[in-house]
Amino acid sequence: MQHDEYGQATTRRLDQALARIAELEARNAELAARLVQLERPGKTPGNFSRPATKGQKPDGPAYAAFRSVVSTAEANRRSVLDSLRSAFAAPPANQAVALPG
């Protein structure tokens, strides 16, 4: 009987840990999105009235790349941090890297 109680207690602790991980990943995604908002340039007299056709939009390529990583992470049910690590990981030494051109 003790073995069964131990197994049930372990299962409960594992479920609690998995729930906490899910909470932390959701909070991480919220904070990452907030960080993107905070890193955008503020409105100044020099950029406030500029038409969108002139100059780079605040949602430029870097933001689009970040959103792509976030979307991929969500689609694969992975944390954004893990997806970023994968995106920036160096390929194995024995793997050829295709260069554009």
Image (tube, rainbow, N blue to C red):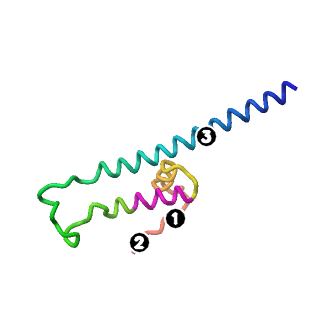
Q: Disc 1 vs disc 2: which is toward the camera? A: 2
Residue 32 position in % (x across, y down): 41, 48
Residue drawn 23% across the image and 69% down it? 52
Which residue is more in the foreground, 15 or 69?
A: 15
Residue 58 position in % (x across, y down): 27, 60
**Tag 3: amino acid:** Ala
Say the numbered circle drawn on residue 96.
Answer: 1
Residue sitting farthest toward the right = 1
Residue 78 position in % (x across, y down): 56, 52
Main SS of the magenta part reads helix
Label 3 – label 1 distance at C-alpha: 40 Å
Residue sitting farthest toward the bottom = 101
**Tag 2: amino acid:** Pro
Image side of residue 75 versus residue 57, left or right: right
Residue drawn 16% across the image and 60% down it? 47
Q: How many marks?
A: 3
Q: Give the residue number, with chain letter if any, for mark 2.
A: 100
Label 2 element class:
loop
> Is the N terminus in the top left, top right, bottom left or bottom right quadrant?
top right
Label 1 – label 2 distance at C-alpha: 13 Å
Q: Give the residue number, with chain letter if any, for mark 3.
A: 19
Q: Which span is picked out in magenta?
A: 65-75
Residue drawn 34% across the image and 60% down it? 62
Position above or below: 6 against 66: above
Sort mark 2 into few (<14), some (14-19) or many (20+) by Cα contacts within 10 Å. Answer: few
